[in-house]
Image (cartoon, rainbow, N blue to C red):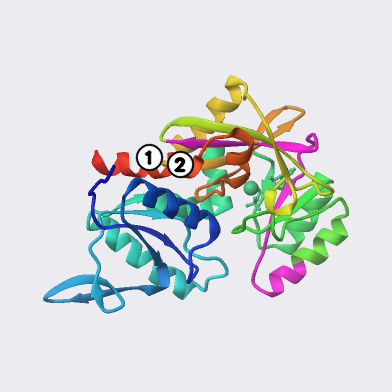
Amino acid sequence: MSMQVGGLAIIHASPIPPKPTRIILAEFKKMGVKVRYLPIQAISLYLSPYGSYVSVGGKKLELRGALLRGIGFSLTLEQFFIRIGILKYLESEGVRFVNKVSSLLRTRNKLETLIALYRAGLRVPTTLATESLKRMYLGAKALGDVVLKPVMGSRGLGSVRTNDADVAFQIVKTLSSFNQPPLLQEYVEKPKRDIRAFVIGGEVVACMYRYSRGSWKTNVAQGGIGAPLNPPEEVKEMALKCLEVLELDYAGVDIAEGKEGFYVLEVNGSPDFEELSRVSGLNIAKLLAEYFLSVLKR
Ligand SMILES: Nc1ncnc2c1ncn2[C@@H]1O[C@H](COP(=O)(O)OP(=O)(O)O)[C@@H](O)[C@H]1O
Ligand SMILES: [Mg+2]
């Protein structure tokens, strides 16, 4: 089957496509749909009194839709502004992004995400955001078992757990001296696992437990291992609500089973899916590719 939708891309920040992106590209290829990979750094925007255009490698870029898989990590504010400026220009010109630019951005900002979820009445861990060392120290003392978490991070990288307020203090002090103040969060007492719910287009397509191995983090990137899960209705509803609140087309929702009930830890707007595909037996990349095309036809 061949389909002509024209001008499709997967956008990410690395010069060559990372593995999940390569898997999605392969699915498009199998479907006979042409989708190119675009590193975000390769896109240029030209604005003039006579008109404007976006180009790649000196050639004008005609896009209809883009699967936005990332904007990069460890960015300077300047890189961030240029990348977001160009993406938002494209979006305002009618390019359909999956996920939408501002929605993906919000998921990159763990604080903004938590605020939005909290406002919507979802249970999130007690969190302290401050640049005050003193407040952090007092917060760590009050909360006891805490996690210090990068406000922009993924794969469990860089999060630290301690129940010693002085250790927390030293970590926050050091990070702050590099202008990278973290978030302080209560450690949610949970089994040696959490739940990953994967939602596409308003439907929970797959769920799994992620069991941690030798760490309090359950990320697959930290050695976590998936196991099948037929999620309770409450988990499904929570996950769906997260996507609704954050206006996401698709996402992976991390849910912890705390003593008081389920907590949303994080919503990932460009989630990996290899482990979930393995555990669920579903071809998640294919589902994503199909969803992307269906959105463009609307
Ligand atoms: N407050 C918390 N309480 C208990 N476990 C947590 C907490 N925050 C994170 N974790 C564990 O660490 C993992 C990574 O944290 P998360 O917030 O999902 O960030 P990311 O996956 O982007 O690095 C979670 O999947 C969970 O297993
Ligand atoms: Mg996570």
For the N terminus, give its image quadrant.
Answer: top left
Give the image quarter of residue 290. Answer: top left
Is residue 249 highlighted in magenta?
A: no
Label of residue 219 in the image: none
Q: Disc 2 or 1, which lies upstream in sequence?
A: 2
Q: Residues within 10 Å of mark 1 (few under 14, many from 20)?
A: some
> Taking the image as drawn, is residue 123 in sight?
no
Give the image quarter of residue 194. Answer: top right
Indicate the position of residue 16 as horizontal and vertical percent values: 48, 69
Query: Left of 181 or right of it: where is 281?
Result: left
Q: Magenta residues, as a range?
A: 173-200
Circles 2 and 1 in contact, beta carbons < 8 Å: yes
Instruction: Calculate the distance from the C-alpha at mark 2 to the C-alpha at mark 1.
Output: 9 Å
Q: Amino acid at mark 1?
A: Tyr
Which element type, helix, strand or loop, lies under badge 2? strand
Residue annotated with mark 2: 250
Query: Left of 78 or right of it: where is 297?
Result: left
Residue annotated with mark 1: 291
Residue at 73% x, 27% y is 260
Is residue 196 highlighted in magenta?
A: yes
In the foreground, 284 or 254? 284
Image vertical order of residue 291 relative to residue 160, above or below:
above
Residue at 80% x, 34% y is 191
Indicate the position of residue 184 as horizontal and vertical percent values: 71, 53
In the foreground, 163 or 29? 29
> Taking the image as drawn, is residue 177 in sight?
yes
